Amino acid sequence: MIRLVVGLGNPGKEHERTRHNAGFWLVERFASANGIVLRKDNKFQALVGRHEPSGAWLLMPQSFMNASGRAVQMLAGFFKIKPEEILVVHDELDFPPGTARIKQGGGIAGHNGLKDISQRLATHDYWRLRLGVGKPPVGMEGADYVLQKPPAEERAAIDAAIERSLAVLPQCLSGDIQSAMQKLHTDDKKQEDKKQEDKKPEPKKEPEKESGLKSSLKALFGRK
C-alpha cells in the first residue's frame, strides 16, 4: 500500500513549466481532480495534502530539487511511513515524452532529487513513477535540459502519460501496485506501437500495367 505520494520539482513561477517539474504536475492534477487542497506546511517545508479515501499523504517539497529528501524524511518519520510505502513521481531522461513507468528501487541516474531522498532514507527501496521527458540534444547537459520548458508537442505527450498514470494511481494507493504496473506499461506499449505505425511510410504504388493493345501501338508508332 502507498501511504505517501511525493511529487518532485522546483518551487517558483520560473520553474513551474519546466521538465524538472513533471512530478509536481502529476500531484497537482491528482489533488485538483480529488478536491484536495495542498497547503504550505512550514514544519515539513512542503505543500501537503491528504487523500481521505485512502489516507495517503501528498507531498510537494518546497526546498529546491537537490534538498527534496528533507521533507520526505520528516513527514515519513512523523507518520511512521516505510520506504516501501512511498511513491516518488519524477522526470526521467531515459524515456521519451509520453512514457510512464513504475518501479521499485534501482539506480537514480544522477537525479538530484532522488539522490537526496535515497541518502536521507538510507535506501533506494521506495517506489518510483518515472515520467519520460526525453534526452537532451547533443552538447547540452541534462541539468540544463530539464530546466527548460518542453515544446507544445512534448508537453502534450507528457500530459497524456500523466493522465494514464492518474488512471492507475488509485490501485497503487490501495496496494495493488502490480496490477497498476501491468495496466500502465501495457497502455504505454500500445501508445508506442501506435506512434511507430503512424511513422511508417505509405506503401509505394505499383505503376499501372498497360494493356497489350496500347503497348503494341506505342511500339509501332513510338511514344507520344
Image: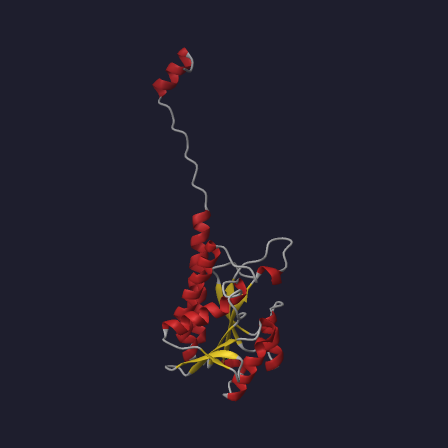
Using the image as rendered, state which of residue 41 and residue 52 is in the foreground.
Answer: 41
Q: Is residue 106 visible?
A: no
> Is residue 141 left or right of 83 when viewed as pictured?
right
Would you identify the image quadrant in which residue 180 lies?
A: bottom left
Give how far across and how far down residue 79 sits, in percent.
49, 88
Pick out the residue farthest to the top. 221
Q: Count of labels shown?
A: 0
At x 46% / y 68%, what residue is drawn? 25
Measuring 44% from the left and 55% from the top, which residue is drawn there?
A: 193
Q: Nearer the viewer, residue 47 or 102?
A: 47
Instruction: Locate residue 205, reporting x and y percent.
Output: 41, 35
The answer to whether residue 22 is left or right of residue 141 is: left
Residue at left offset 58%, top offset 59%: 145
* Among the 4 quarters of the image, the one containing residue 30: bottom left
Q: Quick one: which residue is furthest to the front in this view?
A: 13
Quarter of the image with the C terminus in it? top left
Question: Front-most of 53 and 174?
Answer: 53
Measured as percent of width and height from the top left, residue 139 is found at 65, 54
Which residue is pictured at 46% across the width and 61% down the height?
158
x and y percentages locating residue 125 in the rendered image: 56, 78
Does residue 219 show up? yes
Residue 198, placed above or below residue 77: above
Q: How is the image coloured?
A: secondary structure
